[in-house]
Image (spheres, rainbow, N blue to C red):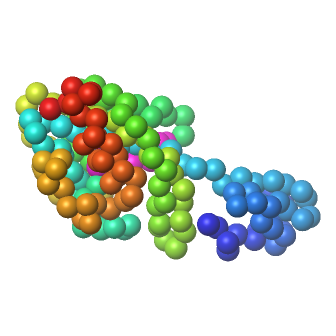
Amino acid sequence: MLRSISYCPHCGEHSLQSDSSKSWRCARCDFLWYQNTAAAVAAIIVQADEILFAVRAGAPQAGKLDLPGGFVDNDESAEESLLRELDEELGLKNVQPKYLCSFPNTYPFAGIEYKTLDLIYWIELRQRPRLQAADDVAAIRWLHPDAVPMEAVAFDSVRRALGYFRANRKRLQIA
């Protein structure tokens, strides 16, 4: 994952060595550093028989379909993060997300592959609100869940979440 890291963040020496697939140890000061999974959130937003997709504005996967959401900030719950991201990306407020599922993901950015755990929520809207693509969203698309071209979806975790949603929407009483 982070093969190029060699300087210890504690003592600054060029002595950091891989200790395992997710940790590095400094040969000089014995500092142990872990590269843990980052938390991310996303929402399957349903209105009538369609799901809202965000078209990614930038890397990675610019132009591909994604679910609105993003990374969880420090000192923020997953739910707080999701509500913040929905407001930043779409101007969507006053919604009640319900937890749906989670999937691991690999998020390549600037030459580094970050491991994430994507927490997926669903939101059912009674009517289609006026939304504005903002932040890192280039456009908004509404698609029927069974008509989503999976090759156009940006990340494996989102494809897996859509599959889970399709398989369970009747049980969950989702439109």
Relative to residue 64, is residue 20 drawn left or right?
right
Query: Where residue 64 sits: x, y (%)?
Result: 26, 64
Residue at left 21%, top 51%?
A: 53
Which region is colored magenta?
Answer: 67-73
Query: Where residue 97 sits: x, y (%)?
Result: 31, 29
Q: Quadrant of residue 30?
A: bottom right
Asked if one can make out residue 93 in the rendered structure from this viewpoint, the answer is no
Asked if one can make out residue 111 in the rendered structure from this viewpoint, the answer is yes
Relative to residue 118, is residue 34 drawn left or right?
right
Residue at left 77%, top 66%?
A: 18
Q: Quadrant of residue 48?
A: top left
Q: Is residue 71 magenta?
A: yes
Q: Is residue 131 magenta?
A: no
Query: Where residue 47 sits: x, y (%)?
Result: 12, 36
| Above/below status of 134 relative to 78 | below
Residue nearest the observer in this picture, 80 or 165 = 165
**Quadrant, the N terminus:** bottom right
Relative to residue 108, is residue 136 drawn left or right?
left
Residue at left 85%, top 62%?
A: 26
Query: Where residue 76 sits: x, y (%)?
Result: 49, 34
Residue at left 33%, top 28%?
A: 98
Residue nearest the observer in this picture, 98 or 59 = 98
**Quadrant, the C terminus:** top left
Picture mark count:
0
